[in-house]
Image: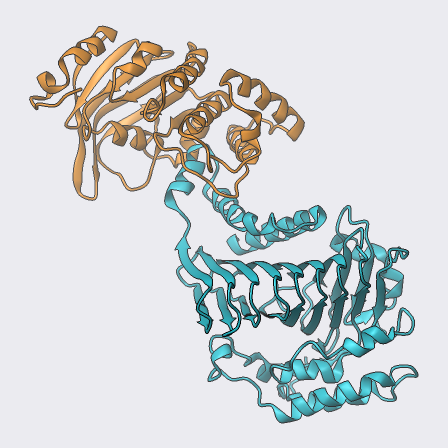
Chain colours: A orange, B cyan
């Protein structure tokens, strides 16, 4: 999978958030996007996944040559885009197993693949559960409803494991997690690293990168990438904060 | 179609047509005569509710002017076989089943296990002579609220009469299945059910209204329920009528001391549907839990009127009703809770949440607490909202197309009510009907 973002400009309610962002992600690469609050990290994640409410005013985003911005969210998902939410949404009354099965089968159907029957699906989901150390009981409950913060994030990674995306975008996956949960979630992500799967890690803190080691680190400030480097850049940010790159005085 | 003008429906003319059909009174049914006469007086003496009446303000009976309903007569569907109604049956239901076709008992379609100590009878005598205990109670529980409920009393033709004696617990749910089949004339029928639980009796009753095909008709139903001290009734009602049908039901329940009543109402069908539910607490320490789901697809009207009467101390009631609307669908919800001066320590909680899938839909929701006691715990709340954009995006971001995502969220919204249905068979059935109707709605 090759993702190419060129001169991407996006606004929310008339306010410019992304101001000409360029990023190239190659097959199997893990890119960390770091930056202070309000720099546009989450906007980037949502624009890639196709959330309504963002206006792309310029630029292009292609995935293996296909124009991503012209597609509906479900079409992007079927192509292999996956967004792990910072705040996974609770769906009262929607059974988690049913949701997971419908999601997988909708994608398979869109790609012209055969849908899985219940037996085949349950076998598959049990394998995936073990991978993220999730309690099987959580499959019987409504999606994310009443889940703890850690359970919600695990459920995101479970979906990622099940849907096997080509491009996984993890939006502040570390937020609200204690060290144990962070470690479990990171283990899950690491287990899913493969030459066929690229990852964009959106994070404010360096902490997550101790667990999921990126190939590239980019600093996003005021809607543009202002610095790119390898994982040592993250260490530098931890020491110095973002201020030396953004010109503002802000602690990391 | 002939070119004759529609005459509309005049209740008094309908009464006379119906009365002619009911004469001569068959042997053994003369006990009904005084009750029917009382109904006839009600029809003559009460004006048809108009939109000037507060409880009919949002629900018009104007359709009565457009169609001339004729009383349905017994007979033409004797030939209905079990195979014909296969698609309507609950999968896995193993309890007793009383089947009425166009208002009349169809003995060949019934399943009667017997031996449980529960007395199952039919108003018109189709299951033998109606026991005196049921005769004595019929008509004594419900008050006539309007001329249509009076018309039911005047013309009641058949229905389920169930008696659960003292201390008896029915082991399996008892199903009352009402099937409507289209007729040449647009028919009206008046099913009349009575459920009596004596002291410490337990029962589960499933009451269903279904159609074969797109039948056009008017079901004017009345149900009386009497719960003795310490008794417990679980009552599920599923209204799955055709999208061309009118359905009016008047359910009145009286609760004795420490009795418990649970109602789950799934009102999914009909062009025009109204359910009046009156629950009266007559003995201390009783509890009622009422859950309901109202579906109003395009041009469907779905109305629920609750009248919860806390007349005595220390009773609790919880009412949780949800509406789903699409197209030009309309939901009317009127939840009235009365707490009388003596009814101290009442605990009453009422909520009505509505999900609007279309801006052309309309909800008229009115919770009313009328509290005359001072030591009570009462609350009410209503919401009207659209589908949550975050929820929709979450599903779509996982690859689920918008229409399917909408359907899943509606099902989820409804599921909290459907999950209250005690019978797994009915839960599956109601879920299936809901999915089909939502599909039609989305199409």
Compared to residue B299, the image places residue A56 above or below, namely above
- Where's residue B405, x and y in %? 48, 42
Q: Return the residue nearer the eye: B81 or B349.
A: B349
Residue A175: percent from left, percent from top: 32, 25
Is residue B92 rendered to the left or right of residue B426?
A: right
Residue B251, given in percent of the width and then of the height, sits at 65, 70
On the question of residue B353 being in view, the answer is: yes
Q: Is residue B207 left or right of residue A175?
A: right
Who's the residue at 67% across and 77% down the image?
B142
Residue shown at 89% from the left, 71% from the top? B126
Q: Which quadrant holds the C terminus of chain A?
A: top left
Front in this rendered view, residue A153 or B404: A153
Q: Quadrant of the N terminus of chain A?
A: top left
Q: Residue A126 occupies which quadrant of the picture?
A: top right
In the image, B209: left or right of A137?
Answer: right
Q: In the rendered image of this protein, does residue B304 appear above or below residue A132? A: below
**Residue closer to the observer: B89 or B320:** B320
Q: In which quadrant of the rendered view does residue A128 lie?
A: top right
**From what the image shows, is residue B407 above or below residue B133?**
above
Asked if residue B12 can be seen in this view, the reply is: no
Q: For the image shown, how many numbered marks are present on the structure?
A: 0
In the image, taking residue A170 as reference, residue A128 lies left or right, namely right
Q: Is residue B79 above or below residue A83?
A: below
Residue A36: % across, % down: 18, 24
């Amino acid at each position: 999978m090759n993702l190419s973002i060129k001169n991407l400009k996006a606004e929310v309610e008339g306010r410019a958030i992304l101001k000409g962002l360029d990023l190239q992600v190659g097959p199997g690469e893990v890119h960390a996007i770091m930056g202070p609050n309000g720099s546009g990290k989450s906007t980037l994640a949502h624009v890639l996944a196709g959330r309504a409410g963002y206006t792309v005013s310029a630029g292009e985003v292609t995935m293996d040559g296909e124009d991503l911005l012209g597609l509906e969210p479900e079409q992007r998902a079927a192509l292999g885009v996956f967004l792990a939410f910072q705040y996974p949404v609770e769906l009262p009354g929607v059974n988690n197993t049913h949701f997971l099965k419908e999601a997988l089968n909708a994608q398979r159907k869109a790609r012209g693949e055969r849908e899985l029957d219940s037996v085949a699906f349950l076998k598959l989901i049990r394998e995936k559960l073990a991978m993220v150390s999730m309690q099987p009981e959580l499959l019987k409950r409504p999606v994310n409803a009443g889940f703890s913060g850690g359970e919600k994030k695990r459920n995101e990674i479970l979906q990622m494991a099940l849907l096997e995306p080509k491009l996984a975008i993890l939006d502040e996956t570390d937020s609200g997690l204690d060290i144990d949960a962070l470690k479990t979630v990171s283990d899950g992500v690491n287990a899913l690293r493969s030459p066929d799967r690229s990852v964009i890690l959106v994070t404010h803190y360096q902490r997550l990168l101790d667990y999921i080691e990126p190939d590239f680190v980019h600093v996003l400030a005021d809607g543009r990438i202002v610095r790119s480097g390898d994982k040592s850049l993250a260490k530098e940010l931890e020491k110095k904060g973002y201020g030396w790159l953004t010109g503002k005085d802000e602690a990391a | 179609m002939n070119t004759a003008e529609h005459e509309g429906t005049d209740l008094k003319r309908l009464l006379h047509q119906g009365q002619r059909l009911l004469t001569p009174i068959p042997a053994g049914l003369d006990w009904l005569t005084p009750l029917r006469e009382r109904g006839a007086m009600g029809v003559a003496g009460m004006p048809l509710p108009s939109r000037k009446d507060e409880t009919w303000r949002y629900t018009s009976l104007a359709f009565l002017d457009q169609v001339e309903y004729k009383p349905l007569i017994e007979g033409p569907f004797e030939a209905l076989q079990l195979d014909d109604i296969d698609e309507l049956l609950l999968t896995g239901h193993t309890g007793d089943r009383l089947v009425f076709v166009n208002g009349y008992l169809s003995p060949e379609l019934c399943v009667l296990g017997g031996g449980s100590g529960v007395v199952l009878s039919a108003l018109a005598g189709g299951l033998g002579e109606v026991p005196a205990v049921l005769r004595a109670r019929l008509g004594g529980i419900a008050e006539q609220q309007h001329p249509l409920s009076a018309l039911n009393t005047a013309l009641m033709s058949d229905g389920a009469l169930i008696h659960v004696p003292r201390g008896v617990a029915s082991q399996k749910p008892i199903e009352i299945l009402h099937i409507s089949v289209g007729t040449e004339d647009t028919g009206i029928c008046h099913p009349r059910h009575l459920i009596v639980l004596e002291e410490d009796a337990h029962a589960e009753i499933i009451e269903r209204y279904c159609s074969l095909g797109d039948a056009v008709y008017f079901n004017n139903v009345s149900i009386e329920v009497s719960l003795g001290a310490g008794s417990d009734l679980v009552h599920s009602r599923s209204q799955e009528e055709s999208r061309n049908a009118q359905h009016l039901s008047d359910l009145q329940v009286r609760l004795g001391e420490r009795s418990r009543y649970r109602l789950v109402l799934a009102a999914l069908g009909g062009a025009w549907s109204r359910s009046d539910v009156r629950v009266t607490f007559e003995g201390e320490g009783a509890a009622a839990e009422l859950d309901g789901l109202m579906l109003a697809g395009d041009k469907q009207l779905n109305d629920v009127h609750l009248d919860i009467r806390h007349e005595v101390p220390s009773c609790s009631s919880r009412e949780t009703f949800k509406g789903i609307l699409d197209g030009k669908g309309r939901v009317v919800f009127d939840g009235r809770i009365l707490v009388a001066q003596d009814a101290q320590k009442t605990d009453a909680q009422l909520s009505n949440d509505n999900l609007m899938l279309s801006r052309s839909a309309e909800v008229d929701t009115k919770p009313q607490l009328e509290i005359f006691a001072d030591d009570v715990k009462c609350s009410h709340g209503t919401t009207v909202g659209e589908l949550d954009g975050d929820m929709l995006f979450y599903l779509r971001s996982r690859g689920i197309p918008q229409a399917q995502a909408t359907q899943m969220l509606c099902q989820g919204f409804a599921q909290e009510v459907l999950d209250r249905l005690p019978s797994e068979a009915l839960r599956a059935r109601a879920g299936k009907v809901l999915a089909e109707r939502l599909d039609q709605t989305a199409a």
